[in-house]
Image (tube, rainbow, N blue to C red):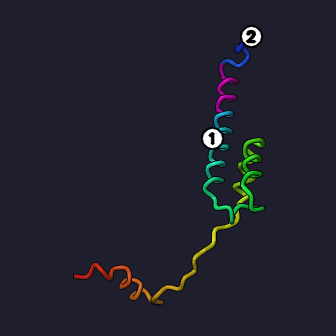
């Protein structure tokens, strides 16, 4: 089969190539973030539907996953040991005093 690429030469081919590259980059980023996200933080508790969305809905699927597919990470709100600046400085530089 002989394909004639003359309609895709020049600017049109470049634009299509860049668009495909960006789409592939988004899919890879989305899948890497999905793999690194713990199952507890994934919306609906399962990763495989999000993988299908990222792969088959292309760029929009990745944006959807990054926007609504993950729950926020839990924040550690442990109380500081000292309430004033002097206590904070002392706790930071406690081992450096000579």
The answer to which quarter of the image holds residue 2 is: top right
| Highlighted magenta segment, given as a residue range | 10-18
Please tell me whether residue 64 is drawn above or below residue 6 in the rendered image. below
The mark found on residue 97 in the picture is none
Residue 20, percent from left and from top: 68, 33
**Residue sitting at 57 percent across and 77 percent down?**
76
Q: Cα distance, mark 2 to mark 1?
A: 30 Å
Closer to us: 45 or 15: 45
Pointer 2 with pointer 1, Cβ within 8 A: no
Name the residue that disc number 1 marks.
25
Answer whether residue 22 is magenta in the image: no
| Of labels 2 and 1, the one closer to you | 2
Report the front residue among 47 and 69. Answer: 47
Question: Above or below — where is 94 with respect to 50?
Answer: below
Earlier along the polypeptide chain: callout 2 or callout 1?
A: 2
* Quarter of the figure with the N terminus: top right
Q: Residue at x 73, y 13 (%)?
A: 3
Q: How many marks?
A: 2
Residue at which label 2 appears: 1
Residue 91 x/y as whole percent: 38, 83
- Taking the magenta stretch, the answer to whether it contains residue 14 is yes
Q: Nearer the viewer, residue 72 or 15?
A: 72
In the image, residue 31 lies at what x, y percent?
65, 48
The residue sitting at the top extreme is 2
Query: Which type of secondary structure does the marked residue at label 1 adopt?
Result: helix
> Please, is residue 47 above or below residue 90 in the view?
above
Tell me which residue sits at (72%, 57%) in the image. 67
């Amino acid at each position: 089969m002989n394909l004639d690429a003359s309609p895709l030469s020049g600017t049109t081919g470049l634009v299509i190539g860049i668009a495909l590259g960006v789409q592939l980059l988004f899919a890879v980023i989305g899948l890497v973030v999905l793999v690194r996200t713990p199952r507890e933080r994934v919306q609906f508790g399962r990763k495989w539907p999000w993988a299908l969305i990222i792969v088959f809905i292309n760029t929009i699927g990745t944006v959807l996953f990054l926007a609504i597919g993950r729950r926020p990470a839990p924040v550690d709100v442990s109380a500081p040991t000292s309430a004033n600046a002097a206590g904070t400085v002392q706790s930071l530089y406690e081992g450096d005093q000579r």
